[in-house]
């Protein structure tokens, strides 16, 4: 659990790279500069890859998204202080930490028990007050709805209607939705209970969003 000047320097370089790739939201870049991504790999052998712009494996056959993807999704969400955000697919907890660092109140769900337990422990050790849940994200989190923003970080076959119902009017949902081999990053603004505005933000590759939970 060590964060050194070298790690900080690597994060500065990563931020410079993300700027050249089109990330311009200063709140996103500031969060990436702050959150120690090397602590989210659960495998110290992978530590040196933590600040390279690529995805890498975590437990249970899952991956931590590449920094550019985390930054893009966070930028598309247009996060503001105190907003209530639901994340589906906690994974390592890194994306949730970026949103938390941006001042959001974060609720995140994971379907794999082991990942849920590891992420919860790490977030606790980092003193990040993030609400973690073990469950199936296809159901959303009705007890805590509605949300200002919703982010899905697994490849969704479609956007579940119950999830859209848990979004406030004026709220934004960002999700990678299946399209052929890969996914397309979609940003959906809820204009009214029945009207949605959708924009497309490029191809991406995520692990699949799966039904149910797993031990
Ligand atoms: N946001 C993560 C990366 C996510 S990888 C990070 O920052 O590290 C996708 C994660 O979504 C995996 O951990 C996978 O187990 C989880 N997942 C897949 N389907 C899900 C579902 N229906 N509900 C909740 N989590 C799900």
Image: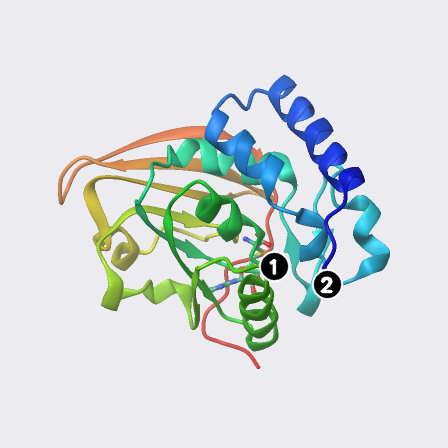
Q: Quadrant of the C terminus?
A: bottom right
Classify mark 1: residues with Cα within 10 Å, few (<14), some (14-19) or many (20+). many
* Residue denoted by label 1: 92
Residue nearer the viewer, 128 or 195: 128
Tell me residue 132's x, y (percent). 44, 66
Q: Residue sitting at 56 percent across and 57 percent down?
A: 93
Q: Residue sitting at 78 percent across and 62 percent down?
A: 43
Q: Mark 1–mark 2 contact, CB under 8 Å? A: yes
Residue furthest to the front: 5
62, above or below 102, in the image: below
The figure's colour scheme reads rainbow
122, above or below 159, in the image: below
* Residue denoted by label 2: 42
Residue nearer the viewer, 140 or 133: 133
Tell me residue 144's x, y (percent). 25, 63
**Ligand 1 within 8 A of label 1's CB?**
yes
Which quadrant would residue 205 be assigned to in this image?
Answer: top right
């Amino acid at each position: 659990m060590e964060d050194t000047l070298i790690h900080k320097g690597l994060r500065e370089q990563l931020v410079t790279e993300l700027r050249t790739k089109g990330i311009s939201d200063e709140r996103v870049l500031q969060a990436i500069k702050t959150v120690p991504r090397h602590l989210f790999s659960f495998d110290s052998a992978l530590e040196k890859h933590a600040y390279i712009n690529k995805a890498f494996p975590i437990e249970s056959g899952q991956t931590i998204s590449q920094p550019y993807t985390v930054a893009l999704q966070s930028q598309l969400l247009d996060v503001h202080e105190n907003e209530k955000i639901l994340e589906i697919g906690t994974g390592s907890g890194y994306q949730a930490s970026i949103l938390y660092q941006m001042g959001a109140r974060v609720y995140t769900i994971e379907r794999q028990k082991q990942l849920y337990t590891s992420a919860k422990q790490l977030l606790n050790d980092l003193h990040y007050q993030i609400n973690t849940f073990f469950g199936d994200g296809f159901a959303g989190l009705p007890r805590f709805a509605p949300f200002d923003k919703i982010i899905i970080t697994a490849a969704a076959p479609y956007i579940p209607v119950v999830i859209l119902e848990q979004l406030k009017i004026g709220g934004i949902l960002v999700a990678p939705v299946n399209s052929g081999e890969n996914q397309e990053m979609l940003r959906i603004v809820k204009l009214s209970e029945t009207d949605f505005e959708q924009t497309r933000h490029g191809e991406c590759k995520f692990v699949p969003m799966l039904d149910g939970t797993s031990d």
